[in-house]
């Protein structure tokens, strides 16, 4: 993991512009937050393919569905609260039901919305989106993996929901890393326990691994960048080899990554799973670091939990 930090929304905008030059049918829709999601940069390059729909998210997703029926590939971006919560009806009935090729870019997800507070901190989006038939759900951990994802989802003929962050996060992967939709990535072969992380929490999990190594505890860390379809194989392998599983997510512990992992192991290899995340409550207003400490999502918290279950 490198010291350099970059917000994944930068990877989104840069890659979308790159793709826009190759694919004339890509369009970008925004709900008056183009500066925050950085999709406005696409608009500066391709003004005739950029649509600011105003603060009318339900209308925006309906319009995206209509464009998709005409052969366009809409990338629809806004805050996660307004991408998964407000237009749920339109996403469900107008996009997922007919399996339309709409890519939903959810910015400022989880507590990364920081001072915007609980009304804007969407910590239920995984649970909403992964229960929708035909929907692929992703949450990448750094600039490199996000750039890959934005390109990769063009190969999926159907709806995709993915998170991007506004806060700068550490670079974890180099350009030679191989990614695949639905396949997790394992760090180390530790046998003492496994920490399964997603999105911005991967960096904390890797720091926890370093903390524990100094105390003679060897864990493995798994990056689940695809919440749905989830990598059942890598989870079952970890359950068999380490016996102790911890999930960590910037999301409610109900319905998110932790629940998805529990579903897998309960069906195939019953194992105790400790779920770390937002413990069934709304968010708080504050900067990212303070919120992570408040909700016990830091590397030190993860390391402490590992020691406790051991």
Image (tube, helix red, strand yellow):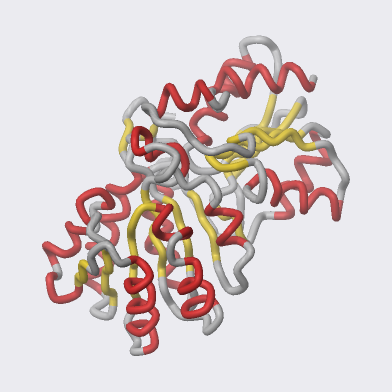
Relative to 21, is 40 above or below?
above
Side of 157 relative to 211 (left or right): left
Left or right, 44 with reference to 164: left
Query: In this rendering, is residue 66 above or below 54?
Result: below
Residue at the far top: name it: 215
Question: Which residue lies at the image location 33% right of the left edge and 79% below the top edge?
Answer: 63
Front position in the image: 45 or 215: 45
Residue 116 lies, in percent from the top left, at: 35, 38
- Left or right of 193, for residue 206: left
* Residue found at x 37% / y 44%: 165
The residue depicted at 55 percent of the width and 27 percent of the height is: 295
The image quadrant of residue 237 is top right
Percent coordinates x, y for residue 45 in the rendering:
13, 65
Q: Quadrant of the N terminus?
A: top left
- Which quadrant does the C terminus fall into? top right
* Total numbered badges shown on the rendered structure: 0
Q: Vertically, is 8 above or below 275?
A: below
Task: Determine the residue positioned at 26% across, 73% down.
Answer: 27
Query: Residue 303 location in percent, x, y?
Result: 63, 19
Left or right, residue 39 beside residue 151? left
The residue lying toward the viewer, choosing from 23 and 293, is 293
Q: Quadrant of residue 20?
A: bottom left
Q: Farthest residue toward the bottom? A: 70
Where residue 2 sits, quadrant-wise, is: top left
């Amino acid at each position: 993991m490198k010291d350099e930090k970059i917000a994944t929304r930068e990877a989104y905008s840069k890659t979308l512009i790159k793709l826009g030059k190759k694919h004339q049918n890509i369009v970008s829709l925004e709900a008056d937050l183009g500066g925050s999601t950085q999709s406005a940069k696409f608009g500066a390059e391709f003004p005739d393919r950029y649509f600011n729909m105003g603060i009318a998210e339900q209308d925006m997703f309906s319009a995206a569905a209509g464009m998709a029926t005409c052969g366009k590939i809409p990338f629809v971006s806004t805050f996660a609260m307004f991408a998964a919560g407000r237009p749920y009806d339109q996403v469900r009935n107008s996009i997922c039901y007919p399996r339309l090729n709409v890519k939903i870019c959810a910015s400022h997800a989880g507590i990364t919305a920081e001072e915007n507070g609980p009304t804007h901190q969407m910590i239920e989006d995984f649970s909403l989106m992964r229960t929708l038939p035909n929907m692929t759900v992703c949450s990448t951990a750094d600039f490199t993996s996000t750039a890959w994802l934005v390109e990769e989802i063009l190969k999926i003929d159907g709806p995709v929901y993915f998170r991007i962050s506004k806060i700068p996060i550490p670079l974890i992967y180099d350009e030679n890393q191989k990614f695949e939709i639905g396949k997790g990535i394992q760090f180390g072969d530790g046998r003492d326990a496994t920490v399964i992380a997603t999105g911005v929490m991967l960096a904390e999990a890797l720091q926890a691994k370093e903390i524990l190594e100094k105390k003679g505890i060897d864990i493995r860390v798994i990056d689940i960048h695809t919440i749905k379809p989830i990598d059942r194989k890598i989870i079952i392998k970890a359950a068999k080899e380490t016996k102790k599983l911890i999930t960590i997510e910037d999301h409610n512990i109900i319905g998110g990554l932790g629940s998805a992992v529990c579903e897998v192991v309960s069906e195939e290899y019953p194992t105790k799973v400790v779920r770390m995340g937002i413990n069934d409550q709304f968010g708080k207003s504050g900067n990212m670091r303070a919120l992570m400490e408040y909700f016990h999502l830091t590397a030190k918290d993860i390391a402490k939990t590992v020691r406790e279950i051991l």
